[in-house]
Image (cartoon, rainbow, N blue to C red):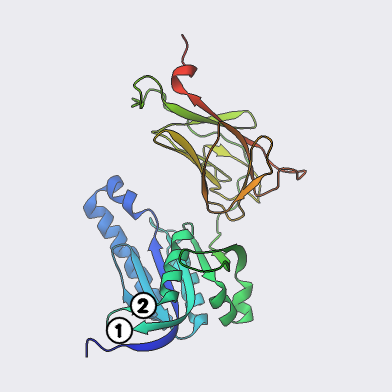
Amino acid sequence: MSDAQFEVTVAVICADISGSTALYDKVGNRKARAQIDGCLTILQDVISEHGGEFIHSRGDDVLCIFEDPNNALDTMQAMLARTRDGALSVHIGLDFGPAIRTRNDIFGDCVNVAARLSGLANPKEALCSRTLFKEISPEGRAELHYFDSRKLRGKARAENIYRYADVTVASSTQVSFGAAPNTDLPHAPRDGTEQLSALIAYDGSVAECTQEREVTVGRAETCDLVLPRQWVSRRHIIIEMRKDHAYLRDVSSNGTYVCLPGQDPILLRRETMALPGKCILSPTKHPESEDALSVTCQLHHLAQLKPA
């Protein structure tokens, strides 16, 4: 009986709790586990209320299936709404297709795609495959927005991806600069004398990215550099140091143009690239657009910045 397998065609949801790993370090093992378990209980309640079948949870995620893809869409929206004001948020991936069902698990391409879309999604966001998009009602499609055409790992060709975000916070209208970088932190340079840093500047404000401190750029006032435009995501860009180089990570809805000297702009969408010595970033808008914003990035060695 336990070895029985049968084919099903279902909508699959893979929902992951955002920031669960950092939570253990922040509040300790016991409190973190309690908060995560509470969030997982909420997600399982939502699944049950919408007629879904809970498959399993592995630490900080849930996997569930639905015969009706419209119920899966409703469940995804309810998951985001129920966790909106909690200590933890979720990011979700959805797909639809054939799978192999066993007593305690489910296997198939649609399960893999849902998991990869979940990994691509930001907190408080869901990404849906084109396959699921075609199966839901016109009313459901109206809730989703085209995000990107992308070749997921293991797939032969690029497929359209659609996005749903639980947007409840009004945009910021004030430019502010985050806390000044802590230059008193101890450094561990590779050669014992100097360490690479990146200076990120916008409209007269400058933030420094070091091995100990990443820099965030976006619309939210909590970002280190705040760009007060509705078309800029709340967290649009993250600049971080990895060993001996700086990396740009786009975490936005609409992408970031990277302008290198003598080259055409490169559009990043949920992708990471190593930054050259100097470049200009233009969130969402093509750099030649009249209202494009310019964020400059310049690499330096800390030893060169200190007074003699």
Query: Which residue in the protein does label 2 denote?
Result: 107
Q: Residue furthest right?
A: 290
Q: Please indicate whether residue 1 sits to the left or right of residue 156 in the image.
A: left
What residue is at 34 percent from the left and 84 percent from the top?
A: 101
Q: Which residue is mark 1?
A: 102
Q: Residues under labels 2 and 1: Cα distance?
A: 8 Å
Q: Residue at x 26, y 59 (%)?
A: 34
Give the residue type that dot 2 points to.
Answer: Phe
Furthest residue toward top: 308
Using the image, determine if residue 183 lies above or below residue 15.
above
In the displayed structure image, the side of residue 305 where residue 139 appears, left or right: right
Q: Residues within 10 Å of mark 1 (few under 14, many from 20)?
A: some
Amino acid under label 1?
Answer: Thr
Residue 18 is situated, as x and y percent measured from the top left of the image, at 40, 57
**In which quadrant is the N terminus drawn?**
bottom left
Is residue 273 in view?
yes
Q: Position of residue 251 (x, y in %)?
A: 52, 51
Position of 137 relative to 78 (above/below) = below
Who is closer to the viewer here, 221 or 285? Answer: 285
